[in-house]
Image: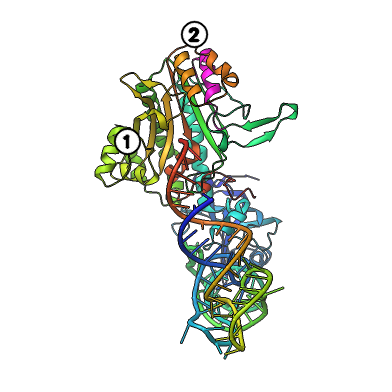
Amino acid sequence: MNFVNVKDVKNFNGQEVTFRGWIYNLRTSGKIWFLLLRDGTGLIQGVVSKNDTTEEIFNKKDILTQETSVTVTGLIHEDRRSPGGFELIVKDIIIHQIAVDYPIALKDHGVEFLMENRHLWIRSRKQWAVLRIRHTVYYAITEYLNENNFFRFDSPILTPNACEGTTTLFQVPYFDLGYAYLSQSGQLYLETGIMSLGRVYDFGPVFRAEKSKTRKHLTEFWMMDAEAAFVEHAENMQIQEELIRFVIRKVLDKNLSELEILERDVEKLRKADAPFGKMTHHDAVDLLRSKGSEINYQDDLGAQDEFLLTEHSDVPIFIEKWPKEIKAFYMKRDPENPNLVLGDDLIAPEGFGEIIGGSQREDDHDILLQRMQAENMPIQDYQWFLDMRKYGSVPHSGFGVGLERLVTWMSGVQHIRETIPFPRTIYRIQP
RNA sequence: UCCGGAGUAGCUCAAUGGCAGAGCGGGUGGCUGUUAACCACUAGGUUGGGGGUUCGAGCCCCUCCUCCGGAGCCA
């Protein structure tokens, strides 16, 4: 048999082919009936008419159900009336297994019901489309990095100590050594990698036990952390911008039909592939206060602030040079103003919020040590990290991209939980 | 954790303190071009758990549970 993927259907016009997949929907109309078949690569409509087939095949309409697995053979032909422009004149249907009482109808469902049935919900068209965009984004990021001399450097997931505050760590028993913690970021390890490979990245799941309950948070999410030697603040932002614009172009190139399924405004993505905005934290606060926000110059941006900053912008905006008090200990002080650090956040337009956090790192041993002592960090646990500033320290920078945040923005979905196959949130770990 | 909201048929939702209903899905029948098809008939209920007020509670009160939205923190 000539097994074919639905996505390749246009190459088989007029030929007899066989698809393997699942029944997405069934419509009967007397002496003719239609089935929608999905095979993972796409959807195609099959037509079965009484006059053109055997009674045995025609009567399969009485036993087929939504999500029944089948092998379907037939003749491809072009037809405007069919979704996708091609349809299959069915000659034979082999049933693998009949799905009984599939719970997810092609109708509205509540979030709780869909989350309980996440293992089935991923078969639905919109979820399918989002997961395909996730795939594109994932590979676009690695492609950009691989082509720009970054080496994959896998940092550990079980770690002895925290990169950030300990209240947000997941703790696991670790033999006779007490406890280990699930990694929140591979950044500190990546910083060691650049002294070997020059430019490195890791890409994997990270874990944050934050009790965040918003549409932008997961407790387990995928992050790409990149780190580069001899790269300073301005170049760091330039790399981030090139990377994100590369991802936008890849998604527009590969996922137009998925974006259409999701009813994403593609023009907004096209416009975002242009030079990004840039302002200092101080200027951002000025702007926000002029718009009525009560934010202060020592404050982090809130969700409303991120929206206000980007509401009239087609492109993402960098917020750079932050007050050192609200940023992590490892960020390098601004040589022009010791109260600031050379950090940058990249905020996506349309209210999708922060998608990147990055900074030039503090490369001076004594300044870094001071900063760590001021934050009461257990210095002995971080001796290896301080070592890098003793044995050939160099200026260096890095950043972390939240994969699901980026996919949320690209696909335009309203909640981050739809951008990962099995979301982990504060109140849900099933299925 | 805080603030707000919701739990009624498999699903989405109605129901002035007074007989618990509709659409979808299921079943049966009809229809040769359907697009989440349509039409007719039909089955389907411990109204989240516990307690209370009342002649009478899905509806009011207390409590617990579950979920949703938002905030803070962050990617």
Residue A111, horizontal then vertical, whole percent: 54, 57
Q: How many marks?
A: 2
Lower sequence index among marks 2 and 1: 1
Q: How busy is the neighbourhood of tag 2: few (under 14 within 10 Å), some, or many (20 plus)?
A: few
Do the residues at discs 2 and 1 belong to one chain? yes
Residue A357, horizontal then vertical, whole percent: 43, 32
- Report which residue position mark 1 lands on: A297
Rendered residue at 39%/43% (across/down): A302
Residue A318, horizontal then vertical, whole percent: 34, 33
Residue nearest the viewer, comparing A16 with A35: A35
Residue nearest the viewer, comparing A351 with A14: A351
Please give the range of residues in magenta: A184-199
What secondary structure is marked by label 1? Answer: loop
What coloring was used for the rendering? rainbow
- Report which residue position mark 2 lands on: A392
Give the Cα distance between marks 2 and 1.
36 Å
Is A189 one of the magenta-colored residues?
Answer: yes
Is there any visible trace of residue A51 in the rendered image? no
Asked if residue A110 lies left or right of residue A260, the reply is right
State whether the magenta stretch is mostly helix, strand or loop: helix
Rendered residue at 60%/21% (across/down): A381
Asked if residue B72 lies left or right of residue A53, the reply is left
Rendered residue at 66%/45% (across/down): A1
